[in-house]
Amino acid sequence: MSKIRSVQSERANLQMEFAQRKNQLEGSLATLTPEDVRKMLTEFQQLLEDGAADQLGEESVRKAVGCLAD
């Protein structure tokens, strides 16, 4: 009987974690504005141009990581 309760508890915890992550994702998507997208694309364009010109400095690498992390 205790094994059943343990599995039920684990399932409930996983369902709660799933719901929390889903809410986080939906919230992050809802806050993305057209201006945010334009800014990210402009920064990404500059990153590509710097890479093509073999001019990727430390700041450009930080921007690249920022684009991928956001």
Image (cartoon, rainbow, N blue to C red):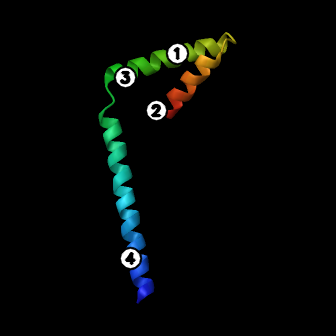
Q: Position of residue 11 (x, y in %)?
A: 40, 70
Secondary structure beneath disc 4? helix
Query: Which comes sooner in the sequence, label 1 or label 4?
Result: 4
Q: Are marks 2 and 1 in contact (CB under 8 Å)?
A: no
Q: In this view, does 67 lie above or below 3?
A: above
The disc placed on residue 70 is 2
Tell which of 32 and 59 is nearer to you: 59
Query: Could you tell me which residue is drawn at 64 percent across and 19 percent down?
Result: 58
Secondary structure beneath disc 1? helix
Query: Which comes sooner in the sequence, label 4 or label 2?
Result: 4
Dot 3 alpha-carbon crowd within 10 angstroms: few under 14, some 14 to 19, many 20 or more: few
Query: Which comes sooner in the sequence, label 3 or label 1?
Result: 3
Q: Distance between the residues labelled 4 and 3?
A: 42 Å
**Viewer-nearest of discs 2 and 1:** 2
Q: In this view, does 8 lie above or below 68?
A: below
Mark 2 residue type: Asp
Q: Is residue 63 above or below residue 6?
A: above
Query: Which comes sooner in the sequence, label 2 or label 3?
Result: 3
Q: How far apart are marks 3 and 1 (CA)?
A: 14 Å
Secondary structure beneath disc 3? helix
Give the residue at mark 3: 36
Mark 4 residue type: Gln
